[in-house]
Amino acid sequence: METKVFSIEGEEIKNIDLNDEVFNVEINDSAIYYAIQGELANRRIGTAATKNRKLVRGSNSKPWRQKGTGHARAGDKKSPVWVGGGTIFGPQPRDYHVRTPRKLKRAAVRSILSRKAQSEGLKVVEDFTIESGKTRDLVKILKNLIEDERTLIVLHGDDQMIRRAGRNIPWLTMQAYNRLSAHELLYSKNVIVMESAVGKMNEFFTKAVERGRS
């Protein structure tokens, strides 16, 4: 499929071919769901913890004898029914990590790229950088291309100056073409792809599809 390439002034300058195996595949909603579920699970630190009756500091002795006082019977001050006692079934540190197969991750990314391309949420822009590294220079370019909405810029490499310029923009995220997050890709209103990144994405994801078939 073909799409337009825009200049940094927001004008159409030419057309570019997008590989159908990357940008025009059948949408796999299951792959998208499991890829995003895995990403979100792997962000969790899992350090939430409460003290049960074993961990609460206090005496193990009975606060009073079993019978004859008129009080309800009690075993120790760390009982969960007492104020300051242990917590019943509270959270304990755990590992939330989910191993998501690489094929599934890439299938999800290709599905989301296809959905964005079909709904005109994906825009290819000529290669540019921000030599000054200043946020205002990047904002000036983005105003010609998009509204101030959640946006993902797909880079062709590790351009430190453009990353530096964009780190103060709260609605902007930047990722390399081979490190795309399914979650960020799906929930971004706009996806801007650098022109040189398109060729690398075509090659990167096509090779992944061929390896999957063999």
Image (tube, rainbow, N blue to C red):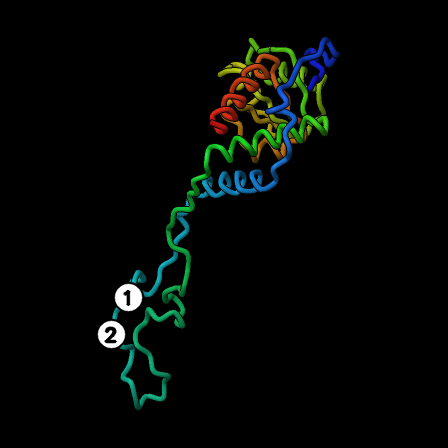
Q: Is residue 14 above or below residue 214?
A: above
Relative to the observer, which residue lies in front, 113 or 52?
113
Q: Amino acid at mark 2?
A: Ser
Which residue is rendered at x = 51% and y = 41% of the image? 40
Amino acid type assigned to the residue bearing label 1 in the image: Gly
Q: Which residue is most to the right?
A: 11
Q: Nearer the viewer, residue 106 or 68?
A: 106
SS assignment at label 2: loop
Determine the residue positioned at 35% across, 71% down: 79
Residue identifier under label 2: 61
| Quarter of image, res 171 | top right
Q: How many numbered markers are drawn? A: 2
Q: Residue at x 30, y 91 (%)?
A: 68
Label 2 and label 1: CA atoms lie apart by 9 Å
Q: How many other residues sit within 10 Å of disc 1, few (<14), some (14-19) or many (≥20)?
A: few
The N terminus sits in image quarter: top right
Residue name at image x 72 percent, y 9 percent:
14
Q: Is residue 61 left or right of residue 8?
A: left
